[in-house]
Amino acid sequence: MAERFEELSEKHTAFIQEQHIFFVGTAAPEGLVNVSPKGMDSFRVLDKRQVAWLNLTGSGNETAAHLLESSRMTVMFCSFERQPMILRLYGNARAIHLGDKDWKNFSSLFPASLAARQIFVLDLSLVQTSCGYGVPFLEWKGERPTLKKWEEAHDLSQIKEYWREKNTLSLDDKYTGIFGDE
């Protein structure tokens, strides 16, 4: 049975900390809806009504573009082991970019990474759990080393050039704000 909560409980936070993957959903008022899988040590519960996640370099940057037009975001965790459960976090988010004044404060919550391009802070309006009976069992084997190897092979100027080429515009040609007001 689905249950609704106004804020995260200790049980919810413990569940989040046990998961190895989460999914982020965003959409601008028009255009494509985006759902992205995220992993690594990139999610933090800040308090009962606020969470943050570190967005590492990828082939696209849809979430950042969407938030410039609509702050709505959903984050979903689901258990692939033991007790079935799905946990969704609904709310409004903002992006913090590398050059923003809040970057240092929030980035200190995560492992240092040259591949870090944004931190998203989500203010929760609803927490929902549901059964997850249809979610399959999957075995955790570990993190993929690919992004870390890519990061180690580049310096910050090369990574920023990649951002200029691949992360400045969304699939709908919407600006992502990755370089602030440059």
Image (cartoon, rainbow, N blue to C red):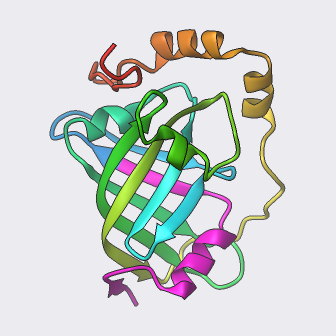
Quadrant position of the C terminus in the picture = top left
Where does residue 125 sit, x and y in percent of width and height?
27, 70
Image point (29%, 62%), residue name: 91
Residue 158 vs residue 34, the one in the foreground: 158
Image: magenta residue range: 1-25
13 left or right of 126 in image: right
The image quadrant of residue 3 is: bottom left
Where does residue 17 sit, x and y in percent of width and height?
64, 70
Residue 95's place in the image compared with 74, above or below, is above
Image point (45%, 21%), residue name: 167
The image quadrant of residue 66 is: top left
Where does residue 27 sit, x and y in percent of width and height?
27, 43
Q: Indicate whether residue 5 is drawn in magenta.
A: yes
Q: Can residue 176 be seen in this view?
A: yes
Where does residue 175 sit, x and y in percent of width and height?
29, 22
Q: Indicate whether residue 12 is drawn in magenta.
A: yes
Count of numbered circles on the image = 0
Residue 115 vs residue 79, the one in the foreground: 115
Image point (54%, 74%), residue name: 134
Quadrant position of the N terminus in the picture = bottom left
